[in-house]
Image (spheres, grey):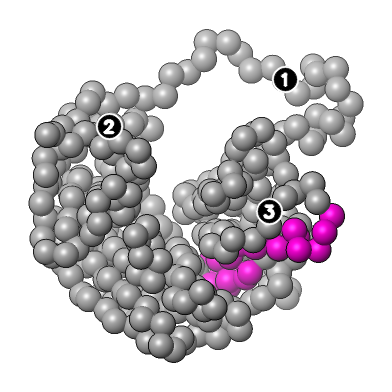
Amino acid sequence: MFLGTSSPRASPRSSSQPQSPFSSSSSPQESWESMLPGPSTRNNFGSSDLNPNGLLAFPSGSSISIVDTRSMQLLSTFPIPPPPSSAAPFVTSVRWIPLPLNRQLLSSEPSSSHLLLAAGDRQGRIALLDFRLKSAILWFETDSKLGIQDICWIQARPDLLILAAITGPSTLSLFNGSTGRCVWKYDASPEYFSCIRRDPFDSRRICTIGLKGFLLSLLHVGDSEESVVIKELQIRTDSTELAKLERDFTGAAAPASAAFPLHVARFAFSQLWRNILFVTFPRELVVFDLQYECVIFASSLPRGCGKFLDVLPDPSNEWIYCAHVDGKLSTWKRKP
């Protein structure tokens, strides 16, 4: 598989000046309801999640906002309850629960209130939240205060949901989605785990990638809540810059996005081809085949672009979109 890239481009800026909210003819209450909360910051680790019904959840500071992407209406904003005698920590990861639940927002039936999402924060807590109730209905049994890097749901069986979470720099933990109990752990130190993604072709499988190229594939076989099969793989990448950052880092152990916010590794499963991963390291784009355990394409940064920040494949076409730390966007297409 070979990919070509188009010229990098940045989002165009409008020449018109934005209107001040104070010049609107609407009442102060209407103006407040039509405004989004403050934007996400680097402390929110770039987290967001869009469910199949078009509801976008994203953290802003210590709160979570829900937006209906069809109407671009802000539906709700609420904080995760803070720890006792402590300021509310930053929310660092959010994931909608992958259940075919009734999501009719205008209904008053109790069954429609189960709009659930999991959220992790900088103090290592994970909660299952009902956004209609704006409250936590379950706290997961985390034992680390090092912070949550990323979370992802595994559909192990129709009656068994497992939440996978990266806690601290290098620990992958699995939690029972009904009880919150931790059922399995894996420590990859001295690696720094960066993100988790679920296989679109098999909801029992997830993968997680590290800044140094370590790739862990995990398949939940569903016999019991802790029944997993793992495969440890390595994608070769230049870690010289990361080694220097590690030497210069003097803080306490922390998730990858807190320790090295501008040194990012991300990946996404292809939605067109089984077992294909699109992986970005700060200065390299890699296409990796999980079945044959090998790199089938690699390319360095496009000319004029900053480091890779994230990667997103087009679900309908053979295009890949890569975000860069300088705000640019590069597009890539598979050569026939």
| Residue topped by disc 3 | 103
Q: Position of residue 182 (x, y in %)?
A: 50, 85
**Vertical position of residue 336 compared to residue 109: above or below:** above
Q: Residue at x 72, y 44 (%)?
A: 75
Q: Secondary structure at mark 3?
A: loop
Labels 1, 3: front one: 3
Q: Position of residue 20 (x, y in %)?
A: 72, 20
Q: Residue at x 54, y 78 (%)?
A: 159
Q: Position of residue 169 (x, y in %)?
A: 37, 70
Q: Residue at x 32, y 75 (%)?
A: 219
- Is 120 in the magenta? yes
Q: Amino acid at mark 1?
A: Ser
Labels 1 and 3 touching (C-beta < 8 A): no
Q: Amino acid at mark 2?
A: Thr
- State which quarter of the image contains the N terminus: top left
Q: Secondary structure at mark 2?
A: strand
The residue range painted magenta reads 108-128
| Residue topped by disc 2 | 331
Tell me the number on the disc at residue 20.
1
Please report whichever mark, 2 or 1, sits nearer to the chain's N-terminal start. Answer: 1
Tell me the number on the disc at residue 165.
none
Q: Is residue 8 left or right of residue 84?
A: left
Q: Alpha-carbon neighbours of circle 1 within 10 Å: few (<14), some, or many (≥20)? A: few
**Vertical position of residue 202 compared to residue 190: above or below:** above
Labels 2 and 1 touching (C-beta < 8 A): no
**Vertical position of residue 159 compared to residue 195: above or below:** below
